Amino acid sequence: MKRILFLLCISIGAWAQKSGTYLLQPDRVFDGKEMHDGWVVLVENDKIAAAGPASSVKAGKDTQTIAMPGATLLPGLIEGHSHLLLYPYNITDWDTQVLKESDSYRTARATVHAKNTLMAGFTTVRDLGTEGAGYSDVALKRAINEGIIPGPRMIVAGRAIVSTGSYGPKGYDTDMEIMLGAEPADGNDLIRVVRDQIGKGADFIKVYADYRWGIKGEDQPSFTLEELKLVNEVARSSGRYLVCHAKSKEAMRRAILAGAETIEHGDFLDEEIAQLMKEHNITFFPTLAAIDAIQQYRNGWKKGKEEEPLAVKNKKKSFRIAVEAGVTIGEGADVGVFPHGENVYEMELMAEYGGMKPLDIMKAATTVNAKALHMENEIGAIRPGLKADLMAVRGDPSKNISELRKVQFVMKDGVVYRNEK
Ligand SMILES: [Zn+2]
């Protein structure tokens, strides 16, 4: 037992150093809005104590200085759409993950996903449903918060809600009761299910406002406008908000009118929906990387060599409409469909598909996402009083967003998880 404890201490020590007072000296600081050359950041315990030109920041004598020549320091990145309980479907298809893997097995895997996410500089994730793993996200969040395992701060959906008949796994003997990837509920029963999910730990309510259940397998709305309004009203009265998966135009329209705050995917977004999103202050999470990855590993698309599949063309088109209309766009990758820790791929596609400037993409993963999570007074920026969630990369991501892959430093709540030269 002693030996096990000793080994445990070594392994924990390897990923985390206790919080203290740190003076971080990169070449430049992105504060969530702008880039500042020659700034330094002072961290005291779990908070940012000061940020500004080196001459203006006074550090005490117990301060540990971390020099980062050539590096850019940013707020810890925020992933707006993750599924830590899933992993890429080319390794194990979704049906098998949902139906044949126990919650314990999936949670064991998720601990590794959480660590990879944190080490990639993503210090917070909004996790959009366990897809059949019950409330394992609530348990994972607890283990991270208690310092048992390294991982990002988690804001979780729990099981998420679908309408009866719409969601998968599908295609099995209809005499069998198949476990679903989310919790079914309809009509007035939605009141009970929303409250139950809240009671079990949901930080917000995630609803599949449409799904591929049309006659030809196309995306069709799954809830009526009245049902979505009911979900929103019940969620709101607990201080929580509604998040809608919606690809079809009609499901997006209903979700927006029902009071959802964020729309996920939006594959068939057009000018009219873009305007409606703006009018209702929606934050749009386009999940570009999920489609891009699935087309490559499921349909064998050779990106760069073959013509783009229709799904990718649609995604590009709708994303460009949203960017040009000035819709608020968050960084939301649907990571889990592709590997955890590769989140920056979404940001690269935001540049490639939509022509977004690197600085705007950096804002999406910090300031914009913090606001979408109702956490702008805690995370997503570098200013005194905010949580000391920081990451640094070699190079300057405002010139090339891919520089965000070159992570050398990660701090969460003032604790150093990664510090390389
Ligand atoms: Zn998702």
Image (cartoon, rainbow, N blue to C red):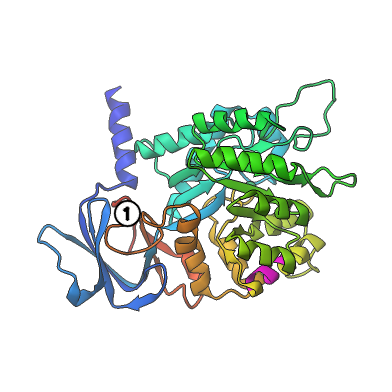
Q: Residues within 10 Å of mark 1 (few under 14, many from 20)?
A: many
Residue 23 image position (x, y, % from top left)? 22, 64
Q: Which residues are magenta?
A: 318-323
Residue at image x 65%, y 32%?
Answer: 190
| Quadrant location, the C terminus | bottom left
- Horizontal side of 416 relative to 160 (left or right) equals left
Residue 103 image position (x, y, % from top left)? 57, 28
The answer to which of 398 and 356 lies nearer the viewer is 356
**Residue that sits furthest to the right in the current view:** 215
Q: Which residue is mark 1?
A: 387
The answer to which of 381 and 10 lies nearer the viewer is 381
**Residue that sits furthest to the left in the current view:** 61
| Quadrant location, the N terminus | top left
Residue 92 seen in the current view: no
Against 27, residue 162 (above or below) is above
Residue at image x 65%, y 37%?
Answer: 161
Q: Quadrant of residue 314?
A: bottom right
- Horizontal side of 407 relative to 10 (left or right) equals right
